[in-house]
């Protein structure tokens, strides 16, 4: 069973591609969806990147709304790929990363791009 964050992203993408509409953000949110955080939604098919869009700072009222927005963007507006088609949904792998607030560092030695990422 998929994590609730991934379930929301999948439902959002499927609804948008099949019906052309944006899903409503659930009225009752899981605790991790209530916060205001940046979110990245990454899409893969057959082991290859198919789309990835995210925000390192929140742009909406909560994680659920951020997922909804970024899932549609990753599926249809990543400039590196053509918009997804319904036929691609069957083997779509989705990951959702909820980011902590950015923190300044005092020196280059404190940077660990693989673990934390880096905003320049």
Image: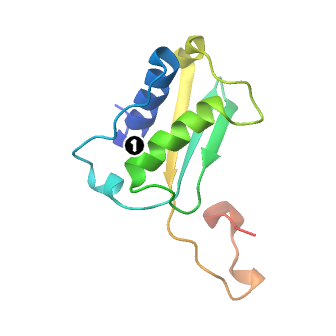
Count of all numbered marks drawn on residues in the image: 1
Colour approach in the figure: rainbow
Q: Is residue 108 left or right of residue 65?
A: right
Q: State the residue lying farthest toward the front.
A: 21
Which corner quadrant holds the N terminus?
top left
Q: State the residue lying farthest toward the bottom.
A: 106
Q: Position of residue 13 (x, y in %)?
A: 49, 28
Residue at 74% of width from left, 82% of height from top? 109
Q: Is residue 82 above or below residue 119?
A: above
Q: Is residue 19 left or right of residue 54?
A: left
Residue at 48% of width from left, 24% of height from top? 16
Q: Position of residue 99 (x, y in %)?
A: 51, 60
Which corner quadrant holds the C terminus?
bottom right
Q: State the residue lying farthest toward the left.
A: 28
Identify the residue under disc 1: 5
Q: Position of residue 10 (x, y in %)?
A: 45, 30
Q: Observer-nearest residue: 27 or 43?
A: 27
Q: Residues within 10 Å of mark 1 (few under 14, many from 20)?
A: many
Q: Is residue 78 above or below residue 13?
A: below
Q: Is residue 82 left or right of residue 11?
A: right
Residue at 34% of width from left, 52% of height from top? 33
> What kind of element bears circle 1?
helix
Q: Is residue 102 left or right of residue 35?
A: right
Q: Observer-nearest residue: 107 or 82?
A: 82
């Amino acid at each position: 069973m998929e994590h609730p964050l991934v379930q929301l992203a999948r439902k959002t993408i499927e609804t948008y591609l099949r019906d052309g509409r944006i899903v409503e953000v659930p009225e009752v949110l899981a605790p991790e969806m209530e916060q205001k955080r940046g979110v990245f939604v990454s899409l893969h098919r057959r082991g290859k990147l198919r789309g990835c869009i995210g925000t390192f700072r929140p742009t909406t009222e909560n994680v659920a709304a951020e997922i909804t927005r970024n899932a549609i963007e990753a599926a249809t507006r990543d400039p590196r790929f053509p918009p997804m088609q319904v036929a691609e949904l069957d083997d779509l792998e989705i990951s959702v990363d909820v980011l902590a607030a950015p923190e300044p560092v005092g020196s280059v030695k404190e940077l660990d791009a693989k673990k934390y990422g880096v905003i320049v």
